[in-house]
């Protein structure tokens, strides 16, 4: 089962302007979710049409997980930005795949 692959605990952060000067974007922890991650092979590396964004990893998680394109996802000390979100409908509510780029 796909749920057997959910061995990692990811933290989901949203980026919002600070309430005080200089109003830079700050990270706010929204919650955590269980999932699994694989690194994309060279033949799978995803680039958007304009080649301005790329994805380096794929995160698998339950379909009920809420993820936004503006979120950052952390796993231990690693930080990822969301590039694409795909609900896999092998059967209703099977799982969600999130393409991310590791930024640190």
Image: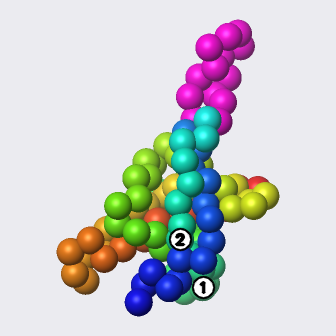
Magenta-drawn segment: 15-27
Q: How many marks?
A: 2
Q: Is residue 31 left or right of residue 88?
A: right
Magenta stretch holds residue 28: no
Q: Quadrant of residue 43?
A: bottom right
The mark closer to the camera, 2 or 1, is 2
Residue 60 point in image, percent of width and height: 48, 73
Q: Is residue 35 left or right of residue 27?
A: left
> In the displayed structure, would residue 30 be above or below residue 67?
above
Q: Quick one: label 2, few (<14), some, or many (20+) residues within 10 Å?
A: many
> In the displayed structure, would residue 102 be above or below residue 5?
above
Q: Could you tell me which secondary element the residue under label 2 belongs to?
A: strand
Front-most of 63 and 26?
63
Q: Which residue is mark 1?
A: 41
- Residue drawn at x 43%, y 84% is 2
> In the displayed structure, would residue 70 be above or below residue 86?
above
Q: Which residue is mark 2?
A: 35
Q: First in sequence: mark 2 or mark 1?
A: 2
Residue 33 point in image, percent of width and height: 53, 60
Front-most of 68 and 93?
93
Magenta stretch holds residue 23: yes
Q: Is residue 80 visible?
A: no
């Amino acid at each position: 089962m796909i749920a057997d692959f959910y061995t990692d605990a990811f933290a989901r952060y949203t980026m919002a302007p600070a309430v005080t000067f200089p109003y830079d974007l700050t990270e706010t922890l929204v919650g955590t979710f269980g999932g699994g991650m694989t690194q994309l092979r060279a033949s799978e590396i995803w680039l958007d049409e304009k080649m301005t964004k790329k994805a380096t990893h794929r995160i698998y998680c339950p379909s009920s997980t809420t993820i936004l394109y503006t979120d950052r996802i952390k796993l231990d000390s690693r930080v990822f930005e969301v590039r694409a979100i795909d609900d896999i409908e092998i059967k209703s509510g099977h799982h969600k795949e999130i393409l991310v780029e590791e930024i640190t």
